[in-house]
Amino acid sequence: MQDDVILKISNLSKSFGPVKALRGVDFELRKGEIHAVAGENGAGKSTLMNVIDGILQPDSGEIILDGAPVTISSPTEAQRLGIGFVHQEIALCPDVSVAENIFMSRTNVSRSWLMNYEKLERDAANVFRRLSDIDASVLLRELSISNQQLVEIAKALTLDCRILILDEPTAALTENEAQTLFRIMRELADQGISIIYISHRMVEILDNCDRVSVFRDGKHIVTSDVADITPGDVVNAMVGRIVDKLYPEKQSADETSEEIILDVKNLNEGPRIRDVSFALKRGEILGIAGLIGAGRSEIARGICRLEGAATGEVWLLGEKLALRNYQDSIAKGMVYLSEDRKGDGLFLDLPISENVSALNLDQVANRLGLIRASSEISQAGDLGRKLNLKCGSLSDPVSSLSGGNQQKVALAKMLSVNPRLIFLDEPTRGVDVGAKSEIHRILRDLARSGVGIIVISSELPELIGVCDRVIVVREGRISGEVAGHDMTEENIMRLASVMDAQAVSF
Ligand SMILES: Nc1ncnc2c1ncn2[C@@H]1O[C@H](COP(=O)(O)OP(=O)(O)OP(=O)(O)O)[C@@H](O)[C@H]1O
Ligand SMILES: [Mg+2]
């Protein structure tokens, strides 16, 4: 074993019933390196990390820490060994303060029954200041997802660990927050801390990591210095075939139509939605861009009546809608795929099949109104095949799926109502490159078949790659629109950012 190898995994296997999540995996982590782990959804990345953190016990294989074999029996044991873990899904308590969340894992160590809240808040604020300007005394549930993610990261940073595992930490962060995180990661690495960094974003891996290991189908495929590998090599190792085209064809000139699917006129709701008007034509995919917090989701949620009571007119296929709530919206065929799959997207403890049919119980119920499990399964099976869903059985709970596959279940749930219009909020967050292009192709096919598609995304390459036209939102109002060759990252950023001269004058 090389001197600078701090953690070595050898020939490790782990199955969940018939699913072989890890098959004879080898992995080495050096002192002070940032080591990226890449692989398609379901490749086994999180499973391996759960083993390293003592959440899961391997079926066979060895974990060698500092040259000696160890058994990591629990996360507490892992923490004692100096291993910290930022989970892919936010695992915090919504009803206690940010400070308490950050120090939660510590308080069970403390002997005093009464916790010293003031000290907690002060310490939390110290850790936090480096990452953001969030007030550590507010309740966690009052924070946005991106801020909750920062709390999760801050929590791990307080643990004085030697090995820090970050499982897709930037999926919910803004570009600036992500850059701050990368700076902190490099400082920690320079201090000798070893970091395992899981991400589906190639640029992040290539720009910020020292080495990358690629996994496929539970197997370790390759480990390489980042300097010696191209993005194409990584993608090919991930999917096991050559991927030449990431995005589907755009709408062609002879596919354009004047038929309007959605027409929004003067939508207003306090400061969050300000006089928003736009139209979606048949066959086109419309993107909504903007900085996080600019009001992109609010507009979609306002139109679908998921929240608030926006005024203005919404016309769907020539009919003026008078929606009272989201149920009415679904009944009209207008659905919203949430960016928060845990909060309002999916029921994690319920079977995949029940999740898929959750919006659409009429289709799977018999004449007495009882739900037929067999219809649920066959409907979920059809959609699952279309979306290339990777799972053991459709009656397994959604929580047993990898992150990206959970996203596909959320999408299948929307498709099950045969919608006329779908708003997709960050539809490919946490989804691997292969499945991502699969989802994009499905969106294009749906648009061609006449379903209205509106995509909200923080990933500009995705919007530019998928959409025919993009509207940009800033501070609740539409600040501009780009299409065709004008659809560039620079143009969109300029319209989205407050730096623009116009936005400074109120
Ligand atoms: N608790 C569990 N019960 C049953 N199957 C599981 C469980 N956890 C993971 N799996 C299965 O093991 C495989 C590997 O999953 P894992 O979560 O490690 O993938 P991943 O590489 O992290 O994917 P992603 O990029 O989507 O997060 C998947 O097929 C998954 O469905
Ligand atoms: Mg994962």
Image (tube, rainbow, N blue to C red):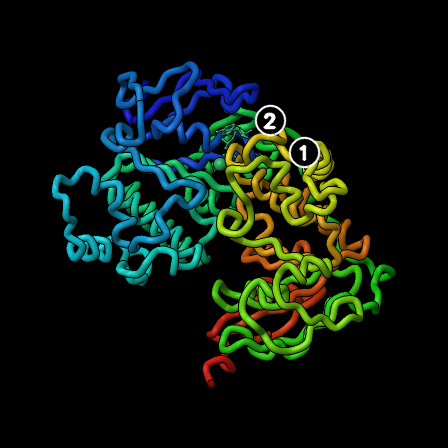
Residue 134 visible to an observer of this rendering: yes
Q: Quadrant of residue 308 in the image?
A: bottom right
Q: Quadrant of residue 267 in the image?
A: bottom right
* Residue shown at the point (37%, 16%) measured from the top left: 62
Furthest residue toward right: 254
Q: Position of residue 359 (x, y in %)?
A: 65, 49
Q: Identify whether 263 is placed above or below 366.
A: below
The residue lying toward the viewer, choosing from 337 and 25, is 337
Of the residues shown, which amino acid type is indicated by label 2? Gly
The numbered disc on residue 392 is 2
Q: Position of residue 262 (x, y in %)?
A: 73, 67
- Disc 1 target residue: 373
- Circle 1 SS class: helix
Disc 2 to disc 1, C-alpha distance: 17 Å
Q: Is mark 2 within 8 Å of ligand 1?
A: yes
Q: Local crowd at mark 2 within 10 Å, few (<14), some, or many (≥20)?
A: some
Is 14 situated left or right of 409 in this image?
left
Q: Position of residue 73 (x, y in %)?
A: 31, 23
Q: Position of residue 170 (x, y in %)?
A: 45, 49
The numbered disc on residue 239 is none
Q: Quadrant of residue 53 in the image?
A: top left
